[in-house]
Image (tube, grey):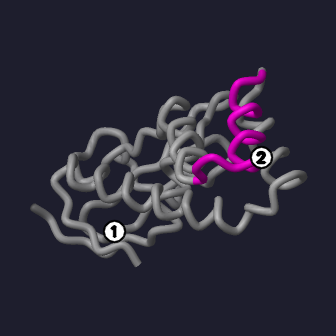
Amino acid sequence: MTSLKIKLDDITDALTTRFDMVEGGFYLDTETGDILLSTEGIDEDELPKDLENNPRYRLIDPLASHEEFQIMEDFVGNLGDTKEADKLRDALNRSKPFRQFKDTLHERTGLSDAWYAFEQKELARLAEEWCEANGIKAELI
């Protein structure tokens, strides 16, 4: 198992960024721990020529929307039987639940700080799981 220091913010960005309109993705350099972004508009001279074909670079697939939705549901579940939990649960059951959740969180609950701390903890856990699944012992910094 390869041991690497990886910036937590970089890998969580990679796990939560989707490229729906353009081609692209994030890659982990398994020798340095750096996260590389390959997308339209990035100077290709700054990226390794064999980025997509060299096993040194691992594509980091973003989380599926159901995984991000699960994080929100888990947060609401941790709130217990409260008015805030009811409001957020209702937001998750409406159309565009991600937008509804964020709007409700900021406008009606006062739980923004608690949410962001919870989300960061969960993303760090998922980053560690991704690393383990890819044979990497990560020290997230």
Image vertical order of residue 87 relative to residue 42, above or below: above
Estimate the x, y position of residue 4 in percent, counting from the top left. 25, 71
Q: Count neighbours of disc 1 (C-alpha within 10 A) and say few if under 14, some if 14 to 19, many if 20 or more.
A: many
Estimate the x, y position of residue 45 in percent, counting from the top left. 53, 57
User: Which one is earlier in the sequence, the residue at label 2 or at label 1?
Assistant: 1
Secondary structure category for the residue under label 2: helix
Res 23 → quadrant: top right
Residue 102 lies left or right of residue 124; in this view the side is right
Please tell me which residue is depicted at 71% across the width and 36% down the height of the picture: 98
Residue 102, label in figure: 2
Q: Count neighbours of disc 2 (C-alpha within 10 A) and say few if under 14, some if 14 to 19, many if 20 or more.
A: some
Please tell me which residue is depicted at 31% across the width and 48% down the height of the picture: 58
Determine the residue located farthest toward the front in the rendered image: 81
Res 92 → quadrant: top right
Q: Amino acid at mark 2?
A: Lys
Q: Which residue is mark 1?
A: 33
Image vertical order of residue 80 relative to residue 70, above or below: below
* Marks 2/1: CA–CA distance: 32 Å
Estimate the x, y position of residue 82 in percent, counting from the top left. 69, 50
Residue 70 lies left or right of residue 108; in this view the side is left
Q: Amino acid at mark 1?
A: Gly
Instruction: Say whether residue 87 is magenta.
Output: yes
Q: Main secondary structure of the magenta part?
A: helix
Please tell me which residue is depicted at 24% across the width and 54% down the height of the picture: 56
Start-end of magenta stretch? 79-94
Please tell me which residue is depicted at 55% across the width and 47% down the height of the picture: 16
Cβ–Cβ under 8 Å for marks 2 and 1: no
Secondary structure category for the residue under label 1: loop
Q: Nearer the viewer, residue 64 or 22?
A: 64
| Quarter of the picture holding the C terminus | bottom left
Q: Nearer the viewer, mark 2 or mark 1?
A: 2
